Amino acid sequence: MIKKKVCMLGAFAVGKTSLVERFVKSIFSEKYLTTVGVKIDKKSMQFDNEQIELLLWDIHGEDEFQKVRTSYLRGAAGYFLIADGTRASTLNTAYLLQERTEKTIGKIPFILLFNKVDMADAWEIDSSVLEELTRKNWRHLNTSAKTGEKVEEAFQALARMMLEA
């Protein structure tokens, strides 16, 4: 079995923990729980004839008071940058985290997730942002931890990218 460490990175309250819970346990809770430090979950997936175990490092959210510890990134084979579609400022945090991650551990596979697509009427992210990301060759998906929309697809896509890297 192949084991791959995946880090969940983003601002506070973008849905990192909810995405992991939806993927690992197929559940969603409206109750907000702040992650302190890091919470680690794992889930196995099958690709062709390969078994892969994802070690999911749900890292505390970054804000003006608390930065993500770069030591949490060591050994990662891939990561998700998560932004909240209803808060455009969280995309800036994702950009900063991507830059810092690349400086710390180099270029590894990542996908930017715009979470909370179930609240699309309240979105602050417009199509021009998505077009810019496409020009930069950044893989991105719109997800919903609440409904499960594209959550499984996101984890499968990152797993495939890590296996091909």
Image (cartoon, rainbow, N blue to C red):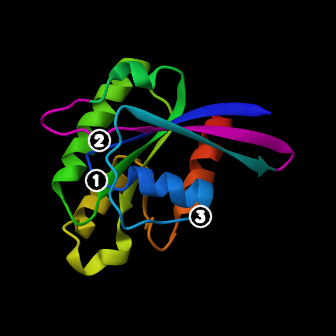
For the point 40% across and 50% down, which residue is it?
16
| Foreground residue among 52 and 131 | 52
Categorize mark 3 by other alpha carbons within 10 Å: few (<14), some (14-19), many (20+).
some
Contact, CB < 8 Å: mark 2 with mark 1? yes
Which amino acid, by three-letter code, is at mark 1? Ala
- Could you tell whether 131 is left or right of 66 in the image? right
Instruction: Kindly identify which numbered label has been placed on residue 13.
Output: 1
At a point 83% along the width and 50% down the height, the residue shown is 48
What is the total number of numbered labels drawn onto the structure image? 3
Query: In the drawing, what numbered circle is on residue 61?
Result: 2
Q: Position of residue 164 (x, y in %)?
A: 66, 37
Ranked by sequence position, the earlier of labels 1 and 3 is 1
Q: Position of residue 141 (x, y in %)?
A: 44, 60
| Marks 3 and 2 close (CB-CB < 8 Å) | no
Image disc number at residue 26: 3
63 inside magenta stretch: yes
Give the amino acid at mark 3.
Ser
Quadrant position of the N terminus in the picture: top right
Give the Cα separation between the discs numbered 1 and 3: 19 Å
